[in-house]
Every structure is written in structure tokens, then in C-alpha cells.
Image (spheres, rainbow, N blue to C red):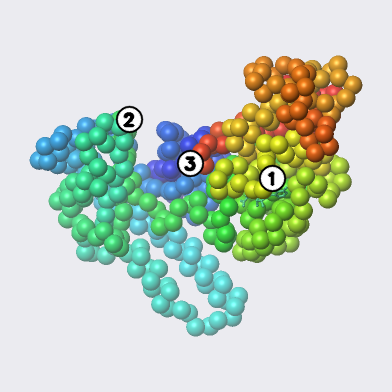
Amino acid sequence: MMMRRFYCTAGAGMEDLLADEVKHKLAATEVEQIPGRVFFCSNAHLHTVTQLKSAERLFLLLRKAAPISIPNNPAKAAVVVQQSIVGHADMWKQNVLTWTTLQGELHDRQHRGQKRKREEEDILNLDATATNSLSSNIQLGKDPPSFRVSCRCSGVIARSYTSQRLSRIIGMAIKEKLGWKVDLREPKLEVNVYLSDDHCIVGMPLLKHPLASRHYMKHNGLRSTIAWAMTSLCPKQLIDCVILDPMCGVGAVLLEAAQDCSSAVFLGMDIEISQLQKAAENVKAAGIEGRVHLIQCSAMEIPLNDGAVDAVLCDVPFGRKFSCSTDMATALPLLLKEMERVLRVGGHLVLLLSLQLSAQLKKIICKHNQHANSSDTQRVRTDPTNANNECTDTPENLMRYKSSSETPILITSLQAHKTHKVSLGSTDAFIHTFTKVQPEMCSH
Ligand SMILES: C[S@@+](CC[C@H](N)C(=O)[O-])C[C@H]1O[C@@H](n2cnc3c(N)ncnc32)[C@H](O)[C@@H]1O
């Protein structure tokens, strides 16, 4: 099969994960990343490429070149665009052919899937209209294809040009060179151009929908790429195990974990019944009812025995979208203690936290040698302003982390691995990973 050049867009902080994913899942070569984009070559079937979990959108790469500067004079601008963005007609012909072949791969697969479904349902009459409408989507025919240009620009170029104006200039240049027809509403082809101080990138999206919109999510919760990243950053692959999300909401984290851990069993808990109802609908839409058990309870009192689960994945509420009645800054020590209790030794904890909660987490997960002389392992001796996390025992500090039992909490059995910064759009968040060890083995 022919090697194709693709690129995917990715949220801030997801580029490394996407680069690893294309290497492992697609055996991709020439993998290169820039902020917000990962480029790669692969001869994998397009259906396999569309299974990427950390990407936002998927494109066929037409051109990746050095940055260009576009003069203010319209006539001169048109010449630069013609030379540096549009280039040779042969390059477009070749890429449109590749794009059409890739659409054909997807169509064949969809068609085979539809056919199998029909056979299964014992429907004898082929639904010719559905099949024909799919075919018409991929056939460009003899007439020049219709197209539209979407340009995004940043840096110096954005000071002189708006994206709309550049899209129009590039569109005119393509029309002139290739004879294609502009159609802003329902074009056959889309051309995406990204111009920055560092790059000039031209591509064609291969799918109408972002890869990041999962067909199995009827109700959206945490961004699916971030939910997937939580499992992927787990220190060890989760196989044949029990995975708990004690604040599961609509189940985004569990559903993403279920994609990669096909032999695992999942427990989803939430205090809100309405969230669990949505989670149940998502689980049903994903067809994994038998593997996910949903329970209404508080994450502060998990109805499980000590050491009952192999992994805990939790997107702890913060920010405006997921603010809840519990003050998480106060509840975090107790919440962590409970998650640590139900985790078996050797099991993994993955948490998504805000910057503020991350700072607090550091104080609760106290270094082993900092409490070595303490006879009371429940006692935390920390100061949130103490950058070295050295133990201090002032009454004020002890009060800061007091739990409902009036006893400050110290967690000594969680060994920290990586912390990974990701963007949730309006705010940044941090994925923290830990392994539970015997307290005496804990060394950081
Ligand atoms: C950040 S949201 C989780 C979002 C989830 N990852 C999703 O995709 O929908 C946090 C969830 O915690 C739940 N929650 C808040 N306090 C809780 C508690 N004490 N025990 C259990 N769940 C709680 C909320 O009902 C909410 O559904």
C-alpha cells in the first residue's frame, strides 16, 4: 500500500501522546511535532488511522513549508500565494487522487459494515439510496470539483490579514490555477491552510467530523482526548483488571479506558443520579453494558473493601463547568485517602487536577522520609508555601488540611510518576500518576 503523508491537530499538551500513538498504532514514520500538530507518514488503512484517540482532526498533508510573508499590495499578495501556497497543478492532482482513494477505503469499509448489518438483520432489499449517497460523496467526476478554503493565521501575518481575507485570496489563486469551483456551503473538497511565523501548512481534512467526537458519547463530559490520555499515561498497561472512577460523571474516562483495556471491568461511581443516568446511556451506546457497573455513592465513602481495585482514574471537579457543592480544596485529603484505601498495592492512581488542587496534592502525598519520625501516619506536616515540601508542624498548617474527622491526612503509600500538563480550552489541568507501594518502600 502507498505511503501517505498525514497530519493531525492536537490540543496543547497532547502532541507527545499523539506522536507516540501514531508510532505504536500505525507504525508511522517521519513523525514530527509542532505545537498543536503532529505530522507522519503511514501506509495503514484509513480506518485504522481514524481510530487514533489523542488527535482532534485528521488531514492529508499537501504542503509543509517554511513560513511565508504576504505583501499588503493585493496584486503582489496574489503572486506570492500562487507561488508559495498553490504551487504546481500536478501536486494538487496527485493529492486529490490520494484523497479520493482514501475516501474510497472508508466508503468500502462502511459499505461492508452496512452489508453485514443488513445480512444480520435479514433485510433482503438493499437500500440503494443510502449506498448511492455515500458513493456520490467520494466521486469527484469529470467536472472540476467544488472547494472552499479555511485559513488560520497567527503571528506577523495576522497583523496585516484576517483569516477570511487570506482564505479569499488563496481560494481565488486555486480557482485560477486549477479551474475548481468555489462553494462555501457544500464543497466536495476543503483546503485548510495554516500560516504562522514558523510554518506554512496546507492540507485537506479526511473526515467531516473531528476524530475527537466519539460516536459512543451521547452525553459529553470531559474532553475525550484528555479522558483517553489519563489511561494512556497510566504507568502500566491495564489488562484483566478492575478500574474505578469514583466521580465518573457521564463516564468519559471509563469509556475511553474501555477502548484500550478490552479485558478490564469498570466501576463508575457518582453522587448525582442524573449523571449516572447519562453515564448509563453512554455505556449502552458504546455497547459495553456487561463490563461497566454504575453505583450511586460518595467518593468520600466508597463502598468497597481495602485493596479492591487495580486502578483508580479520577477527574476531580474544578472550575466553572464542574463546580460542585463539595469544596474540593477542603475535601481533597479525604478523597485521596479513600482512593488510596481501595487501591491494591501495586495498583495505579491517575488524577486530573487543576493547578490549585495539584499544589495541594503535593502537600498531602508527603515524602516518606518526611514522616519517618512520626508515630502518627495520619498526621500531615506541610506548609503550602513551602516549596521544598519540608515538614513543618505549625497549628495553622495542620488546620489547613483537616478532614471531617478533625485529623489532618498524610498519604505515604503513593509513589509519584509523571505529571503531564494538558489544556482544557479555557484552563490548564494536570494529569498526575501514582503507584501504590508498601509505605516502607516509598522513595521519591
Ligand atoms: C469533573 S466531573 C466528572 C466528569 C466526568 N469525568 C465526565 O466525563 O462526565 C465530577 C463529577 O463528580 C461528581 N461528584 C461531586 N462530588 C462528589 C462526591 N462527593 N462523590 C462522588 N461524586 C461526586 C459530580 O456529580 C460530577 O459528576
Instruction: Choose between 68 and 105: the one closer to the eye.
Output: 68
Q: Amino acid at mark 2?
A: Asp
Q: Amino acid at mark 1?
A: Thr
Query: Mark 3 sits on what residue?
Result: 426
Query: Mark 2 sits on what residue?
Result: 198
Point 15% across, 38% down: residue: 77
Judged left or right of residue 187, residue 177 is: left
Residue 394 seen in the current view: yes
Choose top left, top right, bottom left or bottom right for residue 317.
top right
Callout 2 crowding tier (Cα within 10 Å): few <14, some 14–19, many ≥20: few
Q: Earlier in the sequence, mark 3 or mark 1?
A: 1
Is 135 located above or below residue 376 in the figure?
below
Choose top left, top right, bottom left or bottom right for residue 278.
bottom right
Where residue 73 appears, as percent x and y from the top left, is 11, 37
Point 40% across, 68% down: residue: 134
Q: Which mark is residue 326?
A: 1
Are the residues flagged by discs 3 and 1 in contact, CB closer than 8 Å?
no
Are the residues flagged by discs 1 and 2 in contact, CB closer than 8 Å?
no
Q: CA distance from mark 1 to mark 2?
A: 45 Å
Are the residues flagged by discs 2 and 3 in contact, CB closer than 8 Å?
no
Q: Name the quadrant of the C terminus.
A: top right
Judged left or right of residue 3, residue 343 is: right
